[in-house]
Amino acid sequence: MNRRQWLQGAAAVTALAAAPGAAAASDAPRRRVVVLGAGLAGLAAAWELHQAGHDVTVLEARTRPGGRVRTLRGGFATGLSAEAGAMFFTPSARHVTGYADAFGLAYESLFAPALPYARGDALYHLQGRRLRAGPGAQPDWPYALTDEEQALGPFGLLQTYLLPVLEDVDASTPMSVLAERTLAYDDLTLLELAASRGASPGALELIRNGFWFDARSEHASAASSLATDVAAFAGGQPPLAFTGGTDVLARAFSDRLGARIRYGAPVVRIAQYEGGVTVTLNTGDGQDHVSADHAVCTLPFSVLRDTEIDPALSPAKQAVVSGLEYMSVTRVFLQMRERFWEAEGLSGSASTDRAVGEVQHHPILQMETTGARGILEAHVRWTGEPPPLEAMSEAERIDHMLDEMEAVHPGARAHFETGRSKSWQDDPFSRGAFSNYRPGEVTRWLPEAARAEGRIHFAGEHTSVLNTTMEGALESGVRAAREIDAAP
């Protein structure tokens, strides 16, 4: 598929992915559909198909909805929660905001003046130095920067070297336009793109270590990173979050779908035949089978590659399923008896080049009910060889990250109460946190990842140009539902 065909496909997806519930007026024949996975993609597909009048069954291996959207509440003090998966979205995420508004879910800007959000200077720990940057004041960055770059700081570098590529992109920009803007840079990584636009080697290091997308900036396609990570800064869009925890969106879908979702139902085989599909799942007593006219497969390709499919997928599809890389993410959450960092005028979050990775405070929206306690998260991402913490026990991970956190936030160990961790690559139903398209793969692989094979339709963040995001997952589920609703 060439570039023009791919862009036409992206535009078609945008046209099909109308407002939530738009399939309700469908005149299509009533069909039986089995949806594999109750993450956001599967939930959106199931809801749209149900709204259109089709019979839907959702098979979910876990005992909860949401997939890689997971809000942790147990194990922390009353009123505290932490996001182990997806956290933020922007006003341009029209599927996220559309469903939230349709379901009556509250969300807020992280900077809403009415919320007691922990504001403060930006904190960094780079090259062994603890640095803070406030309004109009930049630290002496520990890299070989030009005088202009030294004065710009991380966000200024982003504005100088990368955001001009997304000129005029804002909350109203259609996905097809965003795809057209970014696809030209598919053969580069984000750092290679910045270098081509004049960024010095020192500036590249500051970009790589100064933002949450650090691991992707030197490994992922710039087309993917621009559409998801950098576009979040375009047009001054404020980051938004659900006031009740990110999982309220998944629970809103599941409450409405009710018994149509079957939990504890891991899929082990997908068989396609003339006229339909049969899905085999493991149960506590053996195996069961669900037959339908169509299937929507939202399983991550990291999981699907070990699922039996009969007949086998086409060679082109199988190449993507087998080859698509997933980012590894381990998140360690440390509950503190008080948010001691606020006394220093800090928000709690920090960007580092240390083993602690990116530091994030939780709950991401602090409400009055939160009290004095807070959670500091060590967020570690990588591809390839795992870091030492992956071989550690839960207790060892927490202790190791407490030492790391002490360097970023002195006093962490003295204020520590309890901790939890989540390793997405160790999760048998995820095997990675999100898809990671390497340079050249967005053009070569993404259209194939989203293409249906007979009566099996594919959705999930890995099938969207907005991969890694809740918006991409929801958009892909709506697209798959429209494909089935329009099928002859």
Image (tube, rainbow, N blue to C red):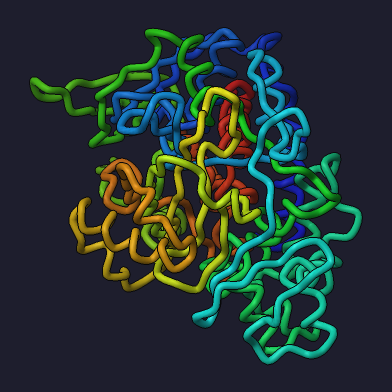
Where is residue 212, by image quadrant? bottom right
Q: Position of residue 358 (x, y in %)?
A: 51, 60
Pick out the residue farthest to the left: 285
User: Is there any visible trace of residue 15 in the rendered image?
Assistant: yes
| Relative depth, front residue between 217 and 415 | 415
- Residue shown at 70% from the left, 61% from the top: 226
| Relative depth, front residue between 443 and 240 | 240
Where is residue 181, by image quadrant? bottom right
Q: Position of residue 395 (x, y in %)?
A: 20, 52
Q: Is residue 48 left or right of residue 64?
A: right
Residue 391 lies, with reference to residue 147, above or below; the image says: above
User: Is there any visible trace of residue 187 in the rendered image?
Assistant: no
- Residue shown at 39% from the left, 33% from the top: 72
Q: Is residue 340 left or right of residue 2?
A: left
- Residue shown at 73% from the left, 78% from the top: 194
Q: Quadrant of the C terminus?
A: top right
- Residue shown at 66% from the left, 60% from the top: 122
Q: Position of residue 147 (x, y in %)?
A: 82, 89
Q: Position of residue 222 (x, y in %)?
A: 66, 68
Q: Quadrant of the N terminus?
A: bottom right
| Relative depth, front residue between 216 and 417 | 417
Q: How many marks?
A: 0
| Relative depth, front residue between 205 and 370 | 370
Q: Is residue 243 left or right of residue 396?
A: right
Q: Is residue 146 left or right of residue 58?
A: right
Pick out the residue farthest to the right: 168
